[in-house]
Image (tube, helix red, strand yellow):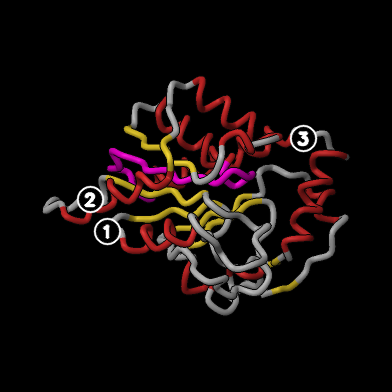
Amino acid sequence: MTKLNYYTAAATRELDRLAIEEFNIPGFELMHRAAKAAYEALLKNWPTVKKIIVLCGTGNNGGDGFIIAALAKQSGIDVDLFVAGDLSKVFGDAKKALDYTLSSGLKPLPAYEFNQINSQQNNSTKNTIDDAVIVDALLGTGLSGKVREPYSHLIDDINSSSLAVLAVDIPSGLCSDTGVILGSAVKADLTITFIGRKIGLATNSGSKLVGKLLFDDLNVPPAVYARVPVSKVI
């Protein structure tokens, strides 16, 4: 079996920092590349998808989700975009992603409304598993403590859904360093992770939650990886 390189969250952040600050790749450009890779993976794995339900947090993981939603809308796919948290607290590259999404004509909905749609979907007699996909862009690798509301409730709603789930970078609620569930975590059908594979994706509960695991280096130069030691080979 082929051994792969894995990184801690701190090491991945350093890879990201080097790419941005020393190799002059704008953070928003990396975010857009990540969103594009995730969206293309979604279409490849669910080619008959007609609706995408995107759940975003207010951090950079949510930023990826914002752009995924915009790309789907621009492609003519029906999109529902839900945001957990206060949009006024979205900053930096995530704010640029939000503005990009708003310019596409999408209107974010409060995350609590996802429960209503989820209930309707589960009560439907139509087999919709190939027609709609949930995109989990709630919580990223920065999570360290136990998942709190409203995220824990949203994670439960995702897991109770009959729909397929794509996790962006890491299933929300999974510790990226240990693979331990931090109170509650999304069970994905497909996870696409970026720049560095996170240790938690392949350890403890991680291997049971990621579903099919894809990796995209976002065209980060090899010289970046030469500067950061591999955290673990699995």
Report the side of 123 relative to 185 (left or right). left
Q: Amino acid at mark 1?
A: Ser
Of the image marks 3 and 1, the number of the one nearer the N terminus: 3
Marks 2 and 3, how far apart at CA: 41 Å
Residue visible at 88% across and 55% down in the picture = 227
Asked whether 142 or 196 is in front, the reply is 142
Which residue is under mark 3?
A: 25
In the rendered view, tell whether residue 145 sits above or below residue 26: below
In the visual, does 73 lie left or right of 225?
left
Q: Amino acid at mark 3?
A: Ile
Question: Could you say whether the residue bearing mark 1 is in a helix, strand or loop?
Answer: loop
Residue at screen point 47% across, 51% down: 136
What's the amino acid at mark 2? Gln
Instruction: Judge whether residue 104 is colored magenta.
Output: no
Spatial CA distance of label 3 from label 1 is 39 Å
Q: In the image shown, does 231 or 9 lie closer to the viewer?
A: 9
User: Is disc 2 in contact with disc 1, using a CB cutoff of under 8 Å?
Assistant: yes
Q: Which mark is residue 121?
A: 2
User: Which numbered disc, 2 or 3, marks the residue that appears first in the sequence?
Assistant: 3
Q: Is residue 206 above or below residue 24?
A: below
**Closer to the observer: label 2 or label 3?**
2
The image quadrant where one finds the N terminus is bottom right
Q: Is residue 205 above or below residue 216?
A: below
> Between marks 2 and 1, how big is the CA–CA gap?
7 Å
Q: Quarter of the image holding residue 24? A: top right
> In the image, is 139 to the left or to the right of 83?
right
Question: Magenta segment, which residues?
Answer: 45-62
What residue is shown with label 1? 162
